[in-house]
Amino acid sequence: MTNDEKIAALEREMAELKAKVSPPKSTFVPMSDAEWIDQMHQAKERRMSMATPPSVGWDLAAAEPKGFMAGVLHDNRAPIGPSSQGVIPSTQQLSNVHPGGASATPGWVAPSPLSNPPGVALADRLMDHQDKLDRAELAQRLGALKR
């Protein structure tokens, strides 16, 4: 069988297979504007059927003690900073309070030098030891494969 005959046979076979296979049927159904609007309205109704009714919010607002939220808002806007409220001088010290006189640059502190956190050197030693064990095991396995 020559190449031309093989190609002709394959083309016939492909034509037969194409004739057997029908194109897929489309399920698309055109919809009018009114139908689409109705479908969207139904989706909104389903979504809103799960919503919390406004009366629940009104009940929650009515249950709040008078002035409570105003106090919360006031607390949120209160100044933040060092305070001596609640400090017992004999047992506690104020943090971030540096003894001494007034500074020419208030609030400035000399930066501490960057360094590794404590324990990094120990972790490095442990990892180096494990690397050594892994390399020995790998060398042993490779030696066993060569035999």
Image: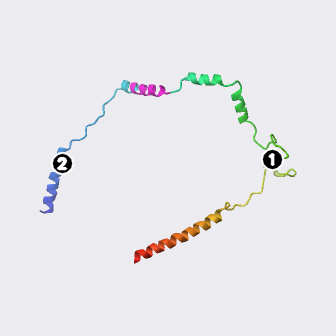
Q: Of residues 107 and 2, which is closer to you in this image? A: 107
Q: Quadrant of residue 89?
A: top right
Pick out the residue farthest to the right.
101
Vertical position of residue 84 compared to residue 38: above or below: below
> At 71% from the left edge and 26% from the top edge, which residue is drawn?
67
User: Are there few (<14), some (14-19), or many (20+) residues within 10 Å of tag 2?
Assistant: few
Q: Amino acid at mark 1?
A: Leu
Q: Which residue is mark 2?
A: 17
The quarter of the picture where the N terminus appears is bottom left
Which is in the foreground here, disc 2 or disc 1? Answer: 1
Vertical position of residue 79 compared to residue 37: above or below: below
Q: Callout 1: helix, strand or loop?
A: loop
Q: Of residues 135 and 46, which is closer to you in this image? A: 135
Distance of mark 2 from mark 1, alpha carbons?
88 Å
Residue 92 position within the rendered picture, expressed as x and y whole percent measured from the top left: 81, 47
Dominant SS in magenta: helix
The quarter of the picture where the C terminus appears is bottom left
> At 49% from the left edge and 71% from the top edge, which residue is drawn?
137
Horizontal placement of 51 versus 6: left or right? right
Coloration of the structure image: rainbow
Q: Amino acid at mark 2?
A: Leu
**Span highlighted in magenta in the image:** 38-50
Dot label at residue 23: none
Horizontal placement of 36 versus 69: left or right? left
Residue 56 position within the rendered picture, expressed as x and y whole percent measured from the top left: 57, 24
Pick out the residue farthest to the bottom.
147
> At 13% from the left edge and 59% from the top edge, which residue is drawn?
5
Q: Which residue is mark 1?
A: 94
Verify whether residue 117 appears in magenta.
no
Q: Of residues 53 and 132, which is closer to you in this image? A: 132
